[in-house]
Image: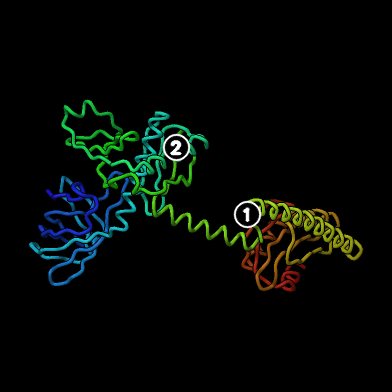
Amino acid sequence: MTEKLFYEDSYIKEFQARVLSCRERNGGYQAVLTRTAFFPEGGGQSADTGFLYTKEGEEIRVTDVHEKDGVVYHHISQPVREGTEVQGKLDFQERFSKMQQHTGEHILSGLVNRRFGYRNVGFHLGTQEVTMDYDGVLTEEDLRQIEYEANEAVAENIPVKVLYPSEEELKNITYRSKIEIEGQIRIVQIPGYDSCACCAPHVKETGSVGLIKIVGAIHYKGGMRVSILCGFRALEDYRMKEKNVVKISNLLSAKQEDTARAVEHLGEELNRQKEKNKALQERYVALCLENAEKQAEPKENIFLFAEELDPGARRNFVNKAMEMTWGFAGVFVGTDDSGYQYVLGSRRPDIQETGKKLNARFQGKGGGRPPMIQGSLKGKEQEIREFLK
């Protein structure tokens, strides 16, 4: 059994221990210590990381930690002799961030359970967001209210309690739990907000959680998957979004509070320009068809090569051109350097076979059903014209 210091004090950053064993495992090494402050992976939360230091000055990285049958195994970067005295040092910035997220999750899930009776049936504390799966649906207004009340709990700076009740005491305690637990149960309580069976480290007072921000919510398996950020992660998220808003504001020459409306105006203008462009392309296609009708001989191919052309305009050209020739009617959009997307049509029975030969000759791909096929290819305009002549 390993003495677990993170249960005694979640704020321990360094500790002294002795190596009980070290073995090679899966291309790395696993060490068991007499005591540890490293939290092992569990309960939806990833393990702590950090370093072990020997008296000789060796620095050994701890990359992962897991627990089995009361023994905590440290995944380390190099072997260490049994009996070696080491100093463990946590990446406490990472640990504290996880404590902020996990305690924030308790507050939010406790409120959801108390207000709506929904259970947290899934939890994951990742390197970015924290996600909780609830077995009921929450409206946008529900989420806003829960978020506000969660931040009220932070402002109250309530002490976070950890209990190890006896079986008799446990009968009088109401608490949340996703699984059946055997042996000693550890209860984390935030008076007025939550009581939950949990093995993970938490902050000592709710004020240390900092801001609790819901950043996403989707319907999931008949309930809701809610994503949150707390404390310094929420601050980093705010900074990133602020940076983007400032950049958008400058690009649009709009006040930050007006950027959404400015983007809407830009979208409306873009749609108007698209419609104008579409009308111009249709007019261009009509002129090309008029010119072809004047010049085309019976069974002569009718082709249009253009750098840009709307998909609807391409099909319109081919449909009209097929009525004017017993040969091939085609649109090729692109350049000799970048290649072409094509639409090829014909009343000839060999249109599909011609398409296969075209693709084989010009590194193309595509297909379709008579009388029209489409695809893409690499080649020069003159060579394509000669091939289909």
- Residues 346 and 283: in front is 283
On the question of residue 146 being in view, the answer is: yes
Question: Dividing the image into 4 quarters, which one contains the C terminus?
Answer: bottom right
Q: What element carries label 1?
A: helix
Q: Is residue 180 above or below residue 50?
A: above
Q: In this view, does 137 lie above or below 314?
A: above
- Residues 230 and 309: in front is 230
On the question of residue 348 being in view, the answer is: no
Q: Position of residue 35 (x, y in %)?
A: 14, 54
Q: Quadrant of residue 320?
A: bottom right
**Residues packed near mark 1 inside 10 Å, few (<14), some (14 to 19) or many (20 plus):** some
Residue at image location 78% in from the left, 60% down from the top: 328
Q: How far apart are marks 1 and 2 (CA)?
A: 28 Å
- Residues 221 and 371: in front is 221
Q: Mark 2 points at which residue?
A: 146
Amino acid type for the residue under numbered disc 2 = Ile
In the rendering, which numbered label is found on residue 259? Answer: 1
**Which sits earlier in the primary sequence, circle 1 or circle 2?**
2
Q: In this view, does 158 lie above or below 208?
A: above
Classify residue 357 as left or right of residue 59.
Answer: right
Q: Position of residue 225 (x, y in %)?
A: 44, 40
Q: In which quarter of the image is residue 60?
A: bottom left
Q: Where is residue 121 in the image (x, y as percent from the top left)?
A: 36, 36
Q: Is mark 2 on a helix, strand or loop?
A: helix
Q: Position of residue 256 (x, y in %)?
A: 60, 56
